[in-house]
């Protein structure tokens, strides 16, 4: 056996912890920049954290202009604002978009490297500023990953993967997720399930720690996502979702995602379809496409999501896919590309762009060609 596993050194999971953010971070920073988006300000989620930072005596600057699927230009703006404030630390409070922006600001604000210099794997050379991340969606797991996904000036989703991107501390407060709208709960929860599934089937970096985390993540997420959608104020379901998303994040940070994500990227990059929804649309066709190579692994995951399933690997694999599709349907998310304004004519460009997602496609249990990608997009049109 041969593997490496990295993680965030300091993880705090506690209801109400975001309102204690000042005390939690004050030993690490005095002049932080706090990155978030306007939706979160409107949802009233930021004030308690901001008040606690001020009460702890910190000179905090609020940047609430994070955009979904962070565009490169907006990320550069955030870096400049952090420099002008002479920030000595960075806090990302929000969904994956806010946390991914915060990671990049923390690695570049004191560096000579440009954003484009760090695209790809292990390109960061400078010293990262202190970084604390607090998620408000139960989805990306970005608070525990070494990944940031940015939308380039050519509308392509580009991954930055580097151990410098692990934060110093992750603060998880399930109460922040109580007000998540149903469609965001559903899409981000499905994204987290895809992280667990794709970590489990990675052909290069599958490892026993990620496997253990992925199975427990999928158990928590698959049994709670519909409950969290239907009874949004259910704290137990919200806790399970936030924990599941974090465990899935730890799993895929060390055993990265595959073709569901690769096929989903053009939906976000070109059409700005939310990341979780893009993944949920591509989940079924990719699971079916992968089955000839991954049936034994999907059969193991059937034992997690539909424990009553029995029979040979192929039968349990089929039960697994059916169960995943049933969960996705029960959340009520859109199931077809055409419901989101995508037409037949768009599919070739999407398949071309998907082919550029080699960083993730290479992890997939079955090689995806241009024709395969096109066929899968047709299936869900
Ligand atoms: N870094 C990683 O490891 C990683 C992994 C997966 C995805 N991603 C990236 O993360 C981004 C997606 O992040 P996301 O799915 O968390 O969504 P997001 O951060 O883009 O937020 C989506 C919307 O939900 C709203 N919102 C968030 N939390 C809320 C709350 N508690 N209450 C009310 N509204 C709330 C936001 O205001 C926003 O309008 C994409 O860019 C994706 O590529 C990163
Ligand atoms: Fe994802």
Image (tube, rainbow, N blue to C red):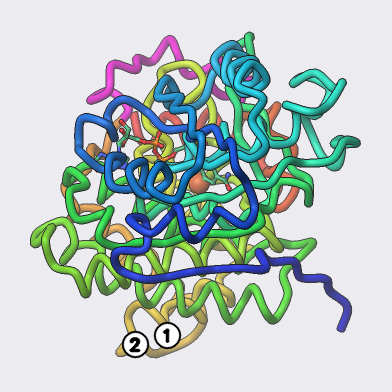
| Residue behind mark 2 | 307
Q: Main secondary structure of the magenta part?
A: helix
**Rendering quarter of residue 259:** top right
Position above or below: 14 against 161: below
Query: In the rendered structure, are the residues bearing label 2 and label 1 in contact, judged by CB atoms less than 8 Å apart?
Result: yes
Report whether 192 appears left or right of 89: left
Q: Position of residue 120 (x, y in %)?
A: 79, 34
Residue 352 located within the stretch drawn in magenta: yes
Report whether 205 appears left or right of 18: right
Report whether 124 appears left or right of 361: right
Q: Nearer the viewer, residue 319 or 263?
A: 263
Q: Which residues are magenta?
A: 337-353
| Residue behind mark 1 | 303
Residue 162 located within the stretch drawn in magenta: no
**Rendering quarter of residue 352:** top right
Q: Secondary structure at mark 2?
A: loop
Q: Nearer the viewer, residue 295 or 57?
A: 57
């Amino acid at each position: 056996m041969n593997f490496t596993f990295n993680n965030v050194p300091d993880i705090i999971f506690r209801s109400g912890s975001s309102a204690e953010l000042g005390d939690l971070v004050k030993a690490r920073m005095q002049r932080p920049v706090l990155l978030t988006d306007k939706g979160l300000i409107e949802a009233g989620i930021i004030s308690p954290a901001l008040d606690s930072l001020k009460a702890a005596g910190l000179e905090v600057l609020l940047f609430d202009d994070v955009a979904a699927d962070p565009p490169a230009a907006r990320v550069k703006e955030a870096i400049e604002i952090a420099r002008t404030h002479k920030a000595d630390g960075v806090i990302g409070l929000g969904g994956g978009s806010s946390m991914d922006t915060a990671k990049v600001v923390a690695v570049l604000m004191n560096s000579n490297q440009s954003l484009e210099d760090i695209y790809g794997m292990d390109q960061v050379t400078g010293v990262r500023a202190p970084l604390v991340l607090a998620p408000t969606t139960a989805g990306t797991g970005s608070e525990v990953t070494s990944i940031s996904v940015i939308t380039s000036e050519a509308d392509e989703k580009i991954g930055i993967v580097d151990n410098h991107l692990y934060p110093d501390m992750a603060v998880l407060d399930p109460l922040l997720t109580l007000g998540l709208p149903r469609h965001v709960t559903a899409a981000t929860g499905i994204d987290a399930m895809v992280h667990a599934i794709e970590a489990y089937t990675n052909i290069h970096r599958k490892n026993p720690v990620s496997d253990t985390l992925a199975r427990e993540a999928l158990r928590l997420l698959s049994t709670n996502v519909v409950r969290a959608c239907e009874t949004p104020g259910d704290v137990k379901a919200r806790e399970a979702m936030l924990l599941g998303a974090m465990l899935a994040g730890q799993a895929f940070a060390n055993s990265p995602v595959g073709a569901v994500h690769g096929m989903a990227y053009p939906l976000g990059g070109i059409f700005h379809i939310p990341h979780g929804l893009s993944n949920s649309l591509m989940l079924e066709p990719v699971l079916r496409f992968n089955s000839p190579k991954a049936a034994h692994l999907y059969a193991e995951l059937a034992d997690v999501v539909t424990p009553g399933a029995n029979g040979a690997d192929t039968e349990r694999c089929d039960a697994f896919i059916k169960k995943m599709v049933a969960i996705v349907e029960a959340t009520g998310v859109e199931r077809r590309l055409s419901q989101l304004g995508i037409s037949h004519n768009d599919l070739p460009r999407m398949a071309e762009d998907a082919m550029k997602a080699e960083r993730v496609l290479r992890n997939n249990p079955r090689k995806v060609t241009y024709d395969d990608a096109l066929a899968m997009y047709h299936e869900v049109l």
